Image (tube, helix red, strand yellow):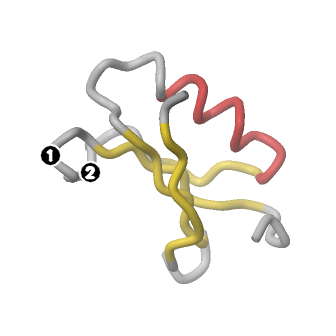
Amino acid sequence: MLESSDYIVRGYGRNDRIVYGSGGVIPTVGIAARAETLFERDDIAYIHVRSARNNCYQCRIERA
């Protein structure tokens, strides 16, 4: 992972559903900052990082 120039970073709720409006294509160097911003929202339970090219799952980011 992290070999591409950008990834989709998308928030999910406690009900394991996408939180619409939370996703976006983010440069690799900005993934951590975007995750921090998403976790400021109470409706985001966890985050998926996916390939920006094929939407393939890469990893899940959990709250600390």
42, above or below 48, in the image: above
Q: Secondary structure at mark 2?
A: loop
Give the residue type at disc 2: Ile
4, above or below 36, in the image: below
The residue labelled by disc 2 is 18
Q: Is residue 13 left or right of residue 29?
A: left
Work out which residue is located at the far front of the displayed protein and give it. Answer: 64
Q: Label 2: how many residues lie within 10 Å, few (<14), some (14-19) or many (20+)? A: some
Q: Give the foreground label among 2 and 1.
A: 1
Residues at badges 2 and 1 in contact (C-beta under 8 Å)? no
Quadrant, the N terminus? bottom right
Rendered residue at 73%/60% (across/down): 6
Image position, residue 8 (x, y; %): 55, 58
Q: Quadrant of residue 12 in the image?
A: top left
Rendered residue at 21%/52% (across/down): 16
Image position, residue 13 (x, y; %): 25, 40
Quadrant, the C terminus? top right
In this view, the residue in front, 5 or 56, is 56
The residue labelled by disc 1 is 15
Give the residue type at disc 1: Asn
Q: Label 1: how many residues lie within 10 Å, few (<14), some (14-19) or many (20+)? A: few
In this view, the residue in front, 5 or 57, is 57
Work out which residue is located at the far left of the displayed protein and give it. Answer: 15
Q: Secondary structure at mark 1?
A: loop
Q: Is residue 58 left or right of residue 41?
A: right
Rendered residue at 60%/72% (across/down): 51
61, above or below 6, in the image: above
Rendered residue at 51%/79% (across/down): 56
Q: Is residue 58 left or right of residue 20?
A: right
Q: Is residue 56 left or right of residue 11?
A: right
